[in-house]
Every structure is written in C-alpha cells, then in structure tokens.
C-alpha cells in the first residue's frame, strides 16, 4: 500500500474530508480550487495536523489521531514540491539541489541532474530561471533529499503549453523510474488522467 489516508480537518468555513487507499505508482488527488487539496498534502507532510483520522505511507503510520501518533515533519521524509518552486533565492541552483542531500542511499546526484535536464543551470541564480526551469530544480531538490515519498502540488500550474508538456513527460519518467509513492494534486482532468496510476476525487 503506498497511501492509506483517512482525514478530516476543519479550516475556517471549509470541512475537508479525504479518503485514499492506493497501491504503488502515482496517485492523483483531483478536485476544484478550494476543495482542500493542498491542505491534504500538508497533512501528509506533517505541516498541518488533521482533526481526526490516519495517515499511512508505505505501511508506516505517520499520524493516527485515536492512537496519539504524530510523527514529526523531519522524520516523515517527504519530498515536497510546493505549488510555487520556493527555491532559496540566495543559493545558486547547485546549492539548492544539494540543500537536503544526505549523500547516503537515495538517488545519484549526477543521474538526477541528467534525468531533470538541468546540468546547464547549475551555476545560475533562481531569479534568472523560467517557471519550468525552477519547477525542475524544485523537483530535483525534493528527490535528492532522499525522500520516502513525493508530494507534488500542481506541478504544471502557470506554465505555458510547451513547458507543461516537458514537465509532464518528466513526471511520467519519474513515475516509471523512481520506485517511490507519489501523491500529486491537480484540478486539471487531462493531467490527472494522463499521469495518474490512480485518480481520487476530493
Ligand atoms: N488557515 C486557514 N484558515 C481558514 N481557512 C483556510 C485555511 N487554510 C485553508 N483554508 C481554506 O480551506 C480551503 C481549502 O484550501 P486548500 O488550499 O487546501 O485548497 P486547494 O484545493 O488546494 O485549492 P487550490 O487548488 O486553489 O490551491 C480553502 O477554502 C481555503 O480558503
């Protein structure tokens, strides 16, 4: 089992309820703007505590309200690619990529750079990158932190058609090459159908 989620959370006026039971591959959480998709990712990452329910990833319980389990964020080891790239502006691309790099286990740095096609960007500052380039670096930074699972929040948003196609192909390669559970959020039905091993609505 990759993701086994059963969560409820009240945020202001919004009542979020999400149930996902998914096998290996890429699970898409699909729903309209404001439905609570980012909030679900935050609860899986450990950034927001659910009101009730459980979060299990790869068979390990990260949160269980009834049992009083709430594994701290750093110990969950999520590779989280936020909706905006959120690169460190004072670090060049290479340093951004290596920021959370553990150097043990995990993916090979050179292979990851090749997979993402960002070798020519290593000495650049984040402010000089296009949206698609920044997104690829953010994905690389997440992959190199030796995560146990990946969370992708609208990885194709605000990109033009050509860049969307590029990142979509990249995510397909990741899905097929990296044996790690991936939970991706989108409000775009075509993206969901094309990329998802499984699509779950919210
Ligand atoms: N801290 C908060 N206090 C009150 N309401 C909140 C808080 N955080 C989120 N919300 C509300 O909860 C709802 C879900 O937000 P969330 O960002 O998870 O939605 P989303 O599905 O990811 O939306 P989008 O696709 O627009 O990013 C929204 O209506 C939002 O305004």
Image (cartoon, helix red, strand yellow):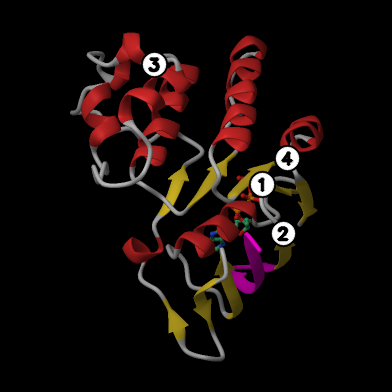
Image quadrant where one finds the C terminus: bottom right
Q: Nearer the viewer, mark 2 or mark 4?
A: 2
Main SS of the magenta part reads strand
Residue 25 image label = 1
Residue at point 64%, 72% (across, down): 7
> Mark 3 vs mark 2: which is more N-terminal?
2
Specify start and end residues of the magenta stretch as a single range: 1-17
> Mark 2 vs mark 4: which is more N-terminal?
2
Element on which disc 3 rests: loop
Q: Nearer the viewer, mark 1 or mark 3?
A: 1
Q: Dot 4 corresponds to which residue?
A: 187
Q: In 3D space, how far apart are the residues under numbered discs 3 and 2 (Cα atoms)?
A: 31 Å
Would residue 161 be counted in the magenta stretch? no
Q: In 3D space, how far apart are the residues under numbered discs 4 and 3 (Cα atoms)?
A: 27 Å
Label 1 CA crowd tier, 10 Å (few <14, some 14–19, many 20+): many
Q: In 3D space, how far apart are the residues under numbered discs 4 and 1 (Cα atoms)?
A: 19 Å
Q: Residue furthest left?
A: 90
Q: Residue 187, located in which quarter of the rendered image? A: top right
Q: Dot 3 corresponds to which residue?
A: 118
Image position of 78 with respect to 115: above or below: below
Element on which disc 2 rests: strand
Label 1–label 2 contact, CB within 8 A: yes
x then y, percent, for residue 67: 52, 91
Give whichever of 21, 173 is nearer the camera. Answer: 173
The image quadrant in which ligand 1 is located? bottom right
Q: Nearer the viewer, mark 4 or mark 3?
A: 3
> Mark 4 vs mark 1: which is more N-terminal?
1
Label 4 CA crowd tier, 10 Å (few <14, some 14–19, many 20+): some
Image position of 196 with respect to 58: above or below: above
Cβ(mark 4) to ligand 1 < 8 Å? yes
Cβ(mark 3) to ligand 1 < 8 Å? no
């Amino acid at each position: 089992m990759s993701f086994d989620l059963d969560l409820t959370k009240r945020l202001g006026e919004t009542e979020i309820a999400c149930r996902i039971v998914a096998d290996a591959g890429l699970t898409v959480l699909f729903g309209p703007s404001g439905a609570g998709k980012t909030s679900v990712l935050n609860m899986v990452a450990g950034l927001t505590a659910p009101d009730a329910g459980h979060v299990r990833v790869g068979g390990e319980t990260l949160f269980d309200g009834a049992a009083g389990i709430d594994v701290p964020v750093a110990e969950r080891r999520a590779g989280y690619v936020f909706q905006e790239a959120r690169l460190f502006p004072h670090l060049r691309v290479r340093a951004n990529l290596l920021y959370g790099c553990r150097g043990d286990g995990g993916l090979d740095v050179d292979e990851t750079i090749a997979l993402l096609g960002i070798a020519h960007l290593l000495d650049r500052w984040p402010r000089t990158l296009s949206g698609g380039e920044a997104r690829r670096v953010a994905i690389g930074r997440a992959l190199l932190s030796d995560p146990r699972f990946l969370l992708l929040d609208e990885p194709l948003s605000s990109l033009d058609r050509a860049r969307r196609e590029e990142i979509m192909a990249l995510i397909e390669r990741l899905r097929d090459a990296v044996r790690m559970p991936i939970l991706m959020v989108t409000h775009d039905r075509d993206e969901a159908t094309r990329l998802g091993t499984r699509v779950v609505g919210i």
